[in-house]
Image (cartoon, grey):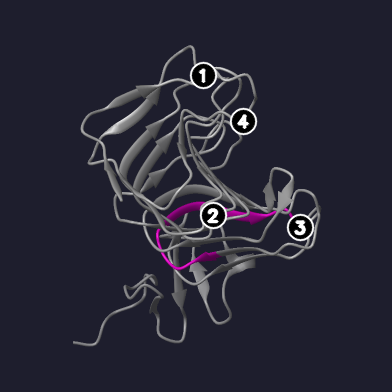
Amino acid sequence: DTVLLLRDTTVTSTGSSANNDPAVKIDKAITLDGNGHKIQVTSDFTTNNSIVSVDYVDGTVVIKDLTIEGGSFDHVRNCLNIIDSNNVTLENLKTSGGTAGVVVNGAKVIIQGTETDIQNGRWGYAVNVDSRNSANRADAALTVKSGTVGSIWAENSDDTTETITVVINGGNIGSVGVNSSAATNVTATVYGGTFDSDPTPYLAPGLSWNPSNGAVYDPSQNQSSSGSSSDPSYSPIL
């Protein structure tokens, strides 16, 4: 099934349970096609809830061509919260405001699309990846293929045995980090993309980072892992 947004939409949440009453709740396999429109909040958005939440979906969920705006309201939690859902693709998603752009709680998520722009929220990161999903525990995995994403932060906040995995194959990324001091079974691996902050601790074997242009590249090939030169001394053979 596909839900097509026909116009910009303003939503609110007045539920009594913090972080359990999102304005928009997706609980089955669907495609939410924003059609270039946005979901925004009102000033009476209460109880520290997320704007959109994907909850416990055993199937494919696609959210595409959508902007979610959390504004500057302190009582708005995440723009998009994803809980224990095993196949979620975010394509050309834009977020601003909230505590974070996207939170991945025990879910499997792919971010892609050249128009994707997930901005940092009040917590200081754009995407948080964690095993937590309420009372239950589950592995979490994030794959970034393309788009612009602010800071990515991976953790296992309750220090349990679940696996948290971040893989970055491309895109324009602010930074990537792992809370190693309090986490177990948490990994981040960078295979490509450009970065504002040094991703060297997370680079796949054989790759390097060029601070002059932010690109990850393969020194043996003298070109970026995405196929374009990232070394200022590189000259193609014509």
> For residue 85, which numbered disc appears in the image?
2
Quarter of the picture containing the C terminus is bottom left
> For residue 19, which numbered disc appears in the image?
4
Up the image or down, 201 lies above or below 51; here it is below
Q: Residues within 10 Å of mark 1 (few under 14, many from 20)?
A: some
2 lies left or right of 101: left
Q: Position of residue 92 (x, y in %)?
A: 32, 49
Q: Are marks 1 and 2 in contact (CB under 8 Å)?
A: no
53 lies left or right of 177: left
Q: The residue tagged with tag 3: helix, strand or loop?
A: loop
> For residue 73, which numbered disc appears in the image?
1
Along the polypeptide, which appears first: circle 4 or circle 3?
A: 4
Q: The residue tagged with tag 4: helix, strand or loop?
A: loop
Q: Quadrant of residue 177?
A: bottom right
> For residue 180, which numbered disc appears in the image?
3
Q: Residues within 10 Å of mark 4 (few under 14, many from 20)?
A: many
How far is disc 4 from disc 1 in space, using C-alphas? 15 Å
Where are the magenta residues, as a range? 167-180
Along the polypeptide, which appears first: circle 3 or circle 2?
A: 2
Type of the residue with mark 2: Ser
Q: Position of residue 87 (x, y in %)?
A: 47, 60
Up the image or down, 74 lies above or below 3; here it is above
* Residue extending furthest toward the top: 44
Q: Residue visible at 56% across and 17% down?
A: 46
Type of the residue with mark 3: Ser
* Total number of numbered discs in the rendering: 4
Q: Residue visible at 36% across and 45% down?
A: 93
Up the image or down, 193 lies above or below 229; here it is above
Q: Residue visible at 46% across and 54% down?
A: 173
Q: Are marks 4 and 1 in contact (CB under 8 Å)?
A: no
Q: Quadrant of residue 70?
A: top left
